[in-house]
Image (tube, grey):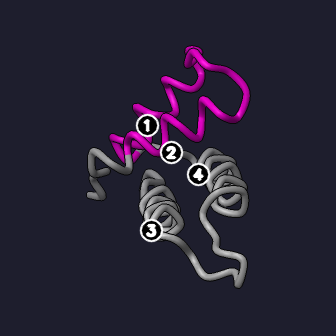
Amino acid sequence: MTKLTHLEDSLLVEVLNKAGREVLLDDEIALLRKTRDNMLSPEESEALCSLIVQELTDTGLLPDSEPTSRGLALEGLIDKVRRSVRS
């Protein structure tokens, strides 16, 4: 079972908030719960990873495309979200 760290959980909330709304809606809260419980569908995992990759591109890379510490944290989050697919 893949467990999100507090930092990863906070990053995921931030990414979801930035994706469109400042207040998490029911669907986003459900996605958070599914991620925390390793119950994402493959489609949900891909959708979340796409949002995280966009955040990585926007805020997590140096001018030479090397990841910053934030970028490394986002890369780790991508790995965890991909492993949060229900079996």
In-image side of 4 versus 82 (left or right): left
In-image side of 43 versus 8 (left or right): right
Disc number placed over residue 45 in the picture, else none: 4
Image location of residue 17, percent across then percent down? 60, 29
Disc 4, SS: helix
Residue at which label 1 appears:
34
Q: Earlier in the sequence, mark 4 or mark 3?
A: 4
Disc number placed over residue 40 in the picture, else none: 2
C-alpha span from label 1 to label 2: 5 Å
Disc 3, SS: helix
Disc number placed over residue 84 in the picture, else none: none
**Which is closer to the viewer, label 3 or label 1?**
3
Amino acid on which the number 4 mark rests in the picture: Ser
Image location of residue 46, percent across then percent down? 66, 55
Residue 19: in magenta span: yes
Q: Residue at x 40, y 31 (%)?
A: 33
Residue at which label 3 appears:
69
Determine whether 67 is above or below 26 in the image.
Answer: below
**Which is closer to the viewer, label 2 or label 3?**
3
Kindly indicate the quadrant of the structure image that contains residue 87: bottom left
Q: Residues within 10 Å of mark 3 (few under 14, many from 20)?
A: few
Q: Residue at x 45, y 34 (%)?
A: 32
